[in-house]
Amino acid sequence: MSFVFYDTETTGTSTDFDQILQFAAIKTDADLREINRIEMRCRLLPHVVPHPAALKVTGMSIARVTDATLPCHYEMMRAVRSKLLEWSPAIFIGYNSMRFDELLLRQALFRTLHEPYLTNTSGNCRADVLPLVQAASQFAPECIRVPRGENEKAVFKLDQLAPLNGFSHENAHDALADVEATIHIARCVRDRAPDCWRRFIQFSSKAGVNGFIAQESAFVVTEFYFNRPYHFVVAPLGSDPDNTAAHLCFDLKHDLDWVASLGDCDMVAWVNASPKPVRKVKTNAAPSLAPIGAVPSSFPGNLSACMDGPS
């Protein structure tokens, strides 16, 4: 399957109220060789007020975003949708796209009267290079150089990560330049940490996640909170009764016999405690999963030392 790497530049960070001003995407083959690219801009919607910080980051002026020669938002989204459908089926990938760009893309499609779930329906899958890099920094730390900020805390911002790993990123925060940087980082992980890359592709689809969970009696879930990694060794319990696209998994740091001895009220209190003793794995959100055998010796202590985490 081919890949579609994409990025947006927007009027701000609100996925509910802000607007896409620039959309860029590059289609590649399975070996990450470019096949085609697009870059589109539109003018500001009359009811949207751009955030000054967003304009500063992207280098856009009021004159530029109100340029009457640019297509309107509806015209741009029609063209974006047409091209993405032409490139489908594919795996749609961005950098922090699952929490930001994809939400804005869905909102924009919905507001222009189109089906919003383009990236994960009709044979399409989705993934995100940010969680890939975060997981790779734990399972194959030699594959990628991660910038360090205050107190030596890991920094995963693309405009810092890409230059440190050999990509000239003078045009950071231009959508097309960010797409090129994302592909470069993806190649770094693919070439230097093939197991991480294989799992990344496998878990881009709901079927891939479901197949893995069905085969494993226990596995590792990796989640990042405020750029800090947390690893949970879990056993699958079954599907979430409230969400068919999620599995409930028991955190194996807890004693199963003790849990079984709890009464109903104590059980409810325990399940709702923090950190969550029952983890939820969303099968359609490209989770970071790994077999227990993939845990490297660089992890602190043994598996039991990797089980604590936030809610």
Image (cartoon, rainbow, N blue to C red):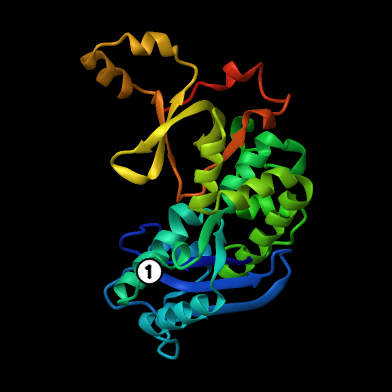
Q: Residue furthest front?
A: 215
Quadrant location, the N terminus:
bottom right
| Residue that appears at 68% across and 42% down | 146
Above or below, comparing residue 309 to residue 90 in the picture: above
| Residue that appears at 57% across and 45% down | 131
Q: Residues within 10 Å of mark 1 (few under 14, many from 20)?
A: many
Residue 278 visible at all: yes
Relative side of 263 to 76, left or right: left
Residue 6 rendering spot, x and y as whole percentages: 55, 66
Q: Nearer the viewer, residue 258 or 157?
A: 258
| Residue that appears at 68% across and 44% down | 196
Above or below, comparing residue 196 to residue 221 in the picture: below
Relative side of 168 to 149, left or right: right
Quadrant location, the C terminus:
top left
Residue 54 rendering spot, x and y as whole percentages: 45, 62
- Mark 1: which amino acid? Gln
For residue 156, what is the image quadrant? top right
Residue 171 visible at all: no
Give the secondary structure at mark 1: loop
Residue 94 rendering spot, x and y as whole percentages: 55, 59
Above or below, comparing residue 273 to residue 66 in the picture: above
The residue carrying mark 1 is: 19
Q: Residue furthest bottom?
A: 69
Relative side of 110 to 248, left or right: left
Q: Nearer the viewer, residue 275 or 254?
A: 254
Residue 264 rendering spot, x and y as whole percentages: 22, 16
For residue 183, what is the image quadrant? bottom right
| Residue that appears at 61% across and 36% down | 290
